[in-house]
Image (spheres, rainbow, N blue to C red):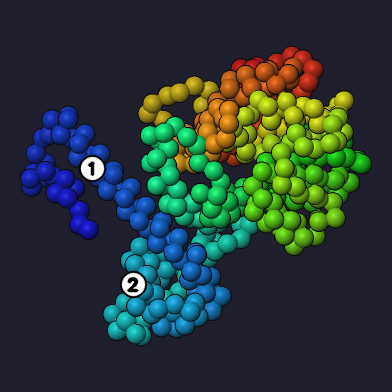
Amino acid sequence: MTAGAGLTGPGGTVPGTPLDPAEAAAQSLSVRLFSGMLATQESFIAYLGVKLGLYQALHAGGPATARQLADRAGLAVRYVREWLEHQAAAGLVAVDDPDLPWQLRRYRLPPGHERVLTTSADPVSMVWTAVLPLGGVAAALPSLLAAFRTGEGIGADVFGDDWRQGHGGANRSIYAGRLAGWLARHVPDLHERLSRGPAFIADIGCGEGWASIALAQAYPAARVTAVDLDEPAVVQARRHAEEAGVSGRTRFLAADARSLAEAGQYDLVCVFDALHEMGRPVQVLRACRALCGPDGAVLLLESQVAERFTAPAGEIERFQYATSVLHCLPAGLAGDGAVGTGTVMRPEVVRSYARRAGFGAVRGYELDDRLHRLYRLDGEPAGPQPDSPAGR
């Protein structure tokens, strides 16, 4: 595939020749889309490196020739050679001497790149956020084309393990490193209650369980019951909890919030980065309210988006919309009665859902995180808070 003439000027336009606004806009957009296509291609090649274990093998085993790396990973050397040459050309891996014959060239991960390109809880790892979700979207593209025509939703199984693991792991470092601090700073009464214990937490839409695990680790006096409709994710959550040493204080169920029998017994009910893709969010919030004890509260971790629609918008808003189009909207349209909220769930939508679910107070908190906002929902009315959307 080669670039079109529009990248250097249509029909060989002489550099420096004045262009009318429409022509300039066309050329600018052409360059932008080419750059986007290149970034997408390179992201898919990084996906191959993650899924085939090439980055991990290069990190664990040290510098290698194409044949050595192919042997480590159990792959065909011709493909590995082409992959390595691309990675070196793109600057993701380094090559000792590019002038050597291909059989003798040794490749390595530059210092720091292993943190980004291998799977871990490191906050700079992009495996969860930027790489694995590509596989889920690629698998769902035929279904997405059909959904645009029919208006139907797309279930979790279509997006598969790549999206399940990517979406679950994307917030892993946030939950492990920041969640307890956010609770201590913004909802100190809940933090104190969970710390003092005994306390009971419900995690609704738990995915692969990373928030539940972080809460169990931060609050040893608490017991966590977590539910999700996606059974494969629940299976993974149990395994993660076992590996983290908190399986005795966590319970994972393939179920929905309404199936929990412990009505009125939870000090904290969480819905973290999940409500916007649930088909019936108001019903979910009603179930969450029923689970809360007399002094309990519901916490939502949701997308950081602007109060109102603007265009053009910044990169965070663009990211949230892109995620919505490719996954969260179709996920939120799956099932009977699904409303299709989408990732861009603005604060007023959160407040509306909460009011309809019977909550009297909704408080929003700005976090030291570009992608998320925290909300607290209480049953009894309260005055506007200075750091809440209602108070601004």
Residue 362 lies, with reference to residue 184, above or below; the image says above
Tell me residue 114's x, y (percent): 53, 65
- Residue 94 is situated, as x and y percent measured from the top left of the image, at 40, 71
Label 1 environment density (alpha carbons within 10 Å; few <14, some 14–19, many ≥20): some
Position of the N terminus, as image quadrant, is bottom left
Name the N-terminal-most of marks 1 and 2.
1
Foreground residue, 303 or 391? Answer: 303
Disc 2 crowd, CA 10 A, few/some/many (<14, 14-19, 20+): few
Q: Which residue is pictured at 49% across the width and 64% down the height?
A: 50
Q: Residue at x 68, y 17 (%)?
A: 355
Residue 369 horizontal/vertical position (percent): 59, 39
Element at label 1: helix
Q: Position of residue 384 (x, y in %)?
A: 70, 16
Q: Amino acid at mark 2?
A: Glu
Image vertical order of residue 349 relative to residue 159, above or below: above
Q: Which residue is mark 1?
A: 30
Q: Which residue is mark 2?
A: 82
For the question of whether residue 253 can be seen, the reply is yes
* Horizontal side of residue 187 vs 29, given as left or right: right
The answer to whether residue 172 shows anywhere in this view is no
Residue type at the position of mark 1 = Ser
* Residue drawn at 40 percent across, 78 percent down: 76
